[in-house]
């Protein structure tokens, strides 16, 4: 086998990984023998085994934990069945049982949930900690799964090269532990790491003479061209490869069973673009350190791609993972209602003025759009202008009205504690959300972390930064009044509002936007 692609834990086990599917499709189209393994889903299912949970629990577990462990098989079945969307109360109870059961593995300062993984003693942004895991000097709670199940599967495939995708910080520690195990078991195999997190680290790694141990090379950017080059070139790989070729969009999901994921119905990820067509928001890493140029899949071919994926996999729901779906893609989807009959999709968009057009919104709804995720960030026009957001609040209000009238749910993102945000500006956000609460189905309320490369010079006087070697964000010192004030405002003002609290409470726990479309007015197909 030329390549084996591995997607490591921990990420939400709700949908198959798009990165692995796109890379796999490209490698196979280039004539290379390739396969992929979703070690994230498999790792969760390994840890959620009832017998294994019982053995890991205290000899005399409390009533709540004992009940949660007993309910795990039923909870897994519910979250994998359309019945999971019949009752939000039963859905929430099942998710809570799974998370409570996973807590049995947290005795050594680790915490695993259905959405993330943290280790109190190790940092995903410390090269020293990453390399300690790779050397076997430390371990994660995934070690038994890696050794007992994953490693035998890898050895049976006899790969010449292994590519590990690390998209999120919650994957970093397990990925390096896995890479170390693979290096010891297969010393001659070429080990390559790529993905969103690796790409974000690229500016910090450019001066290193060698890649992070135990990898032979790291890939920044999409990865297709670099993986093919590594399979055909005789020269030793560079420590860091910059891959700007972003023309591949067609995924190959033949390596997974879409119905095995924790989702009331199978959902497949896809993308209509790479990069961001706006890329100006000052708080966004894509604008601060772009890892790839903006490129879009031909909009007129997008409806056909959805139908092809539905035909080959049996899935009827799709999740667009674009930073923001381009307007051309939206118009193509809206104009293909008949072709997309029986399918559903959701994804991120900007508050683009085109979405205020009732005809476009109606076309999107008829073409399967069930929910749109929109980054509002603030209800203050001054804050939006400081952030270079390019959003007009009056337009945003019209868009919320138009989407609601068309039957498209909205998942709105708010960012508190932005540089120089005043109390009056925070109150303006509260006022906007309350005024439009009837048009907002779900909310994500967050406090800002600044991208490491973001330029806010002179706007944070006296601020001191705490930075880790591979840290992506600059966290203000705990004494900073901005973040502390934002936390207080979130707790005492936003969440004290009955209308806002009601929206927050109907957001699916842990799976959030992945499962939100199942609990909308038009959630069922």
Image (cartoon, grey):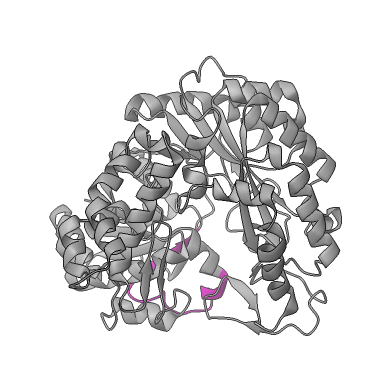
**Which span is picked out in magenta?**
203-220
- In the depicted view, which residue is nearer to us: 423 or 270? 423
Residue at 51% from the left image edge and 32% from the top image edge = 345
On the picture, is 50 further left or further right than 93? left
- In the depicted view, which residue is nearer to us: 50 or 127? 50
In terms of image quadrants, where is residue 252?
top left
Residue at 39% from the left image edge and 43% from the top image edge = 90
Asked if the stretch drawn in magenta spans residue 366, the answer is no
Percent position of residue 361, x then y: 68, 26
User: What secondary structure predominates along the stretch shown in magenta?
Assistant: loop
Percent position of residue 30, x then y: 35, 41
Residue at 52% from the left image edge and 44% from the top image edge = 321
Residue 310 in view of the camera: yes
In terms of image quadrants, where is residue 103?
bottom left
Percent position of residue 165, x then y: 39, 58
On the picture, is 96 further left or further right than 448? left
């Amino acid at each position: 086998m030329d390549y084996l692609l591995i997607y490591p834990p921990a990420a939400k086990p709700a949908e198959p990984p798009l990165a692995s599917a796109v890379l796999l499709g490209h490698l196979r189209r280039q004539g290379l023998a390739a396969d992929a393994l979703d070690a994230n889903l498999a790792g969760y299912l390994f840890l959620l085994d009832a017998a294994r949970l019982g053995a890991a629990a205290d000899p005399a577990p409390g009533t709540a934990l004992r009940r949660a462990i007993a309910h795990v098989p039923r909870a897994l079945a519910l979250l994998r069945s359309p019945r999971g969307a019949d009752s939000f109360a039963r859905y929430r109870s099942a998710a809570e049982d799974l998370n409570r059961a996973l807590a049995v593995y947290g005795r050594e300062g680790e915490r695993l949930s259905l959405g993330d993984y943290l280790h109190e003693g190790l940092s995903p942004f410390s090269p020293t900690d990453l390399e300690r895991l790779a050397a076997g000097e430390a371990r994660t709670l995934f070690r038994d799964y890696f050794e007992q199940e994953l490693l035998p599967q890898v050895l049976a495939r006899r790969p010449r090269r292994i590519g590990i995708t690390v998209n999120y910080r919650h994957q970093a520690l397990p990925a390096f532990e896995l890479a170390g195990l693979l290096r010891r078991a297969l010393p001659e195999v070429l080990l390559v790491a790529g993905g969103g997190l690796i790409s974000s680290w690229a500016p910090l790694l450019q001066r290193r003479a060698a890649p992070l141990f135990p990898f032979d090379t790291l890939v920044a950017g999409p990865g297709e061209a670099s993986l093919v080059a590594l399979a055909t070139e005789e020269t030793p790989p560079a420590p860091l490869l910059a891959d700007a070729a972003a023309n591949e969009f067609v995924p190959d999901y033949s390596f997974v069973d879409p119905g095995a994921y924790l989702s009331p119905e199978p959902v497949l990820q896809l993308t209509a673009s790479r990069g961001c067509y706006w890329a100006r928001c000052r708080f966004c890493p894509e604008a601060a350190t772009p890892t790839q140029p903006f490129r879009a899949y031909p909009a007129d071919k997008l409806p056909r791609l959805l139908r092809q994926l539905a035909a080959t996999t049996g899935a009827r729901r799709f999740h667009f993972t674009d930073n923001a779906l381009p307007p051309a893609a939206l118009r193509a989807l809206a104009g293909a209602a008949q072709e997309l009959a029986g399918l559903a999709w959701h994804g991120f968009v900007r508050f683009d003025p085109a979405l205020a057009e009732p005809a476009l919104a109606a076309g999107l709804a008829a073409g399967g759009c069930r929910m749109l995720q929109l980054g509002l960030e603030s209800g203050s026009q001054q804050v939006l202008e400081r952030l270079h957001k390019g959003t007009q609040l009056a337009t945003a209000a019209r868009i919320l009205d138009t989407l609601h009238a068309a039957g498209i749910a909205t998942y709105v993102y708010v960012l508190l504690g932005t540089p120089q945000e005043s109390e009056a500006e925070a109150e303006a956000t509260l006022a906007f959300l309350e005024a439009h609460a009837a048009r907002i189905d779900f909310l994500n309320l967050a406090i800002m972390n600044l991208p490491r490369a973001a330029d806010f010079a002179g706007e944070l006087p006296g601020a001191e930064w705490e930075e880790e070697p591979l840290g992506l964000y600059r966290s203000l010192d705990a004494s900073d009044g901005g973040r502390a004030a934002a936390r207080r405002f979130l707790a005492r003002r936003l969440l004290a509002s009955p209308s806002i609290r009601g929206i927050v409470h109907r957001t699916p726990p842990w799976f959030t936007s992945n499962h939100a479309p199942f609990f909308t007015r038009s959630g069922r197909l």
